Image (spheres, helix red, strand yellow):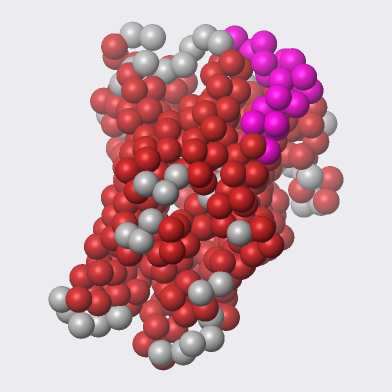
Amino acid sequence: MSAETSGARAALRYPDFRRYAFGRFFATMAWQMLGVAVGWQVYAITRDPLDLGLVGLAQFLPFLALVLPGGQVADRADRRLVMVAAYGVEALCAIVLIGFTLSGSREVWPVFLAMALFGAGRAFWMPSGQAMVVNLVPREVFPSAVAFNSTLFQSAVIIGPSLGGILYALGESALKVDGALLVYCVALALMVAVVVLIGGVRPVRAPPSNKALSLHELFEGIRFVFRRKPVLGAISLDLFAVLFGGATALLPVFAADILHVGPVGLGVLRTAPGVGAALTALYLSQRPIERHAGRWMFGGVAVFGLSTMVFGLSTSFLLSTGALFFLGVGDMVSVFVRHLLVQLETPDAIRGRVSAVSAMFIGASNELGEFESGLTAKWWGVVPAVVVGGTACLAVVAVYLKLFPQLRKLDRFPQPDLSREEIP
């Protein structure tokens, strides 16, 4: 890969990619800020870790119901407009949270409603967003665009939680207002900026299809994934690893009851995985993985599981932060491999539907994983739930090494499939 086609500057030469990338940056920052404020606010009201899990479940159920239709829409409509509409729904999520906070209610069901709106919006922007990047830059620049986009994403994961924690504490102490209210208002302003940026991207459509809308077409992405074993292995490995190993939902409990570091400390804990992932993504933007992709994928997930176990056992804020840092490193490596493999292996005509399947797996691992963490914490206690989850993540790696030899032996990424024909 030449200097002209590698690194961030190569991708940033394309204005539409710049608008898309920075729009996603602001959206992710707003989402991360909301995550800190919602988690701290809900736990402060109920003191029940299960409610933190229900926040994830409230996002997951509408996401699961709508993500396959969202992929179909991405292959039929202007992907840019789909993203604008979906981010508009997420702005409505922030408005609901603002209204809930102003009401002073001690019933948390409006928060679950707001998170359901977030999940519904995500079901549409995620397939469209994943599918359109490859259309915004030339093929030779695509790996660097993915890595740079990941760098911005992880930078938002760093800035968002820290800013959310600081704003929450600032509102409570200096401004004498509800800290959550201040966070939600800033997040709403960011979502408005996102709509403007994404709206400025040129129209992006998949090749036209002569097929009528049908259930057969709706499930084409699932059939494609199950036919391509390396793709199936990559996205399902991520699903089960994060499903069992995710501890993010329980961070408010660790911050409040185990590490005793308050909302600012919670922001630091939520930031730590992003720091590790951002530094890894920055490195990959300059030196993308080109060989032994399968080994890197499995190694990244293994580091994720080990880091989860260390975090669960730690009672030191410094050690916990370090464990979450390496958790982000491992996660970024696996995400990079998975994203390139899925996008380069998929024909453009069905890329939205395949991206929807990938998004469905990711959503299941994240939001359903949060619910699983909250439920097991309710049953066993917070620390055992996290440690057992990390152990299960390592067990998944061991099983997948046997089940998917094609992924384990994968060396180089495939050339992109630019076919305009859909798979029959």
Q: Is residue 294 left or right of residue 97?
A: right
Asked if 359 appears above or below 39 in the picture, the reply is above
- Visible residue check, residue 293: yes
Give the x, y percent position of residue 137: 41, 28
Give the x, y percent position of residue 17: 36, 37
- Visible residue check, residue 26: no
**Magenta span contains residue 408:** yes
Q: Quadrant of the C terminus?
A: top right
Question: In the depicted view, which residue is nearer to us: 378 or 362?
Answer: 378
All told, the count of numbered labels is 0
Magenta part of the protein: which range?
392-411
Residue name at image x 44 percent, y 75 percent: 44
State the predominant SS element of the stretch in magenta.
Answer: helix
**Magenta span contains residue 258:** no
Residue name at image x 49 percent, y 87 percent: 106
User: Image quarter for residue 27?
Assistant: bottom left
Q: Quadrant of the N terminus?
A: top left
Question: In the depicted view, which residue is nearer to us: 271 or 1?
Answer: 271
User: Image quarter for residue 164?
Assistant: bottom left
Q: Is residue 367 left or right of residue 37?
A: right
